[in-house]
Amino acid sequence: MNKMNKVRITAIRQTTYPDLMAKFENPIQHACDIRQGQQWISENAQRPDGLCPSAWDSMKSFVESLANGQGNFFDGWMKNPMSAMISCNDGFRPFSFYLEAINE
């Protein structure tokens, strides 16, 4: 079995859409605990403790590819071919995450 890369996941930025929230979302007390700059390390392409399961669903296939040494998504999309910029699937307050294969 080949050694898998670790993948660093960094919360880069959250965007909110108050107009969409007002129009479509039921009032919600608590939506997201992620903070800008927060980091996690995925080992063996597994969801790190503390990372939102819904955000993980959005990035899992990219983390698995990076962990297995595959990258260069969409033929040169990222400056670092062993990285990806992925947003979670919250349509009201999506967070963008930078994923990068690392060798520690």
Image (tube, rainbow, N blue to C red):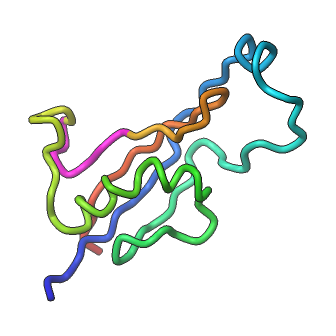
| Span of residues in magenta | 79-85
Q: Position of residue 6 (x, y in %)?
A: 32, 70
Which sits in the foreground, 102 or 54?
A: 54
Instruction: Residue at 77%, 42% (x, y): give it.
Output: 31
Q: Is residue 95 magenta?
A: no
32 up-or-down from 93: above or below: below
Q: Residue furthest bottom?
A: 1
Quarter of the image holding residue 29? top right
Instruction: Residue at 58%, 33% (x, y): give it.
Output: 94
Instruction: Residue at 15%, 64% (x, y): give it.
Output: 69
62 up-or-down from 75: above or below: below
Instruction: Residue at 47%, 37% (x, y): give it.
Output: 87
77 up-or-down from 37: above or below: above
Q: Position of residue 67 (x, y in %)?
A: 26, 67
103 up-or-down from 38: above or below: below
User: On the picture, is 71 further left or further right than 26?
Assistant: left
Quarter of the image holding residue 42? bottom left
User: On the picture, is 81 further left or further right than 11?
Assistant: left
The quadrant of the image that shows the C terminus is bottom left
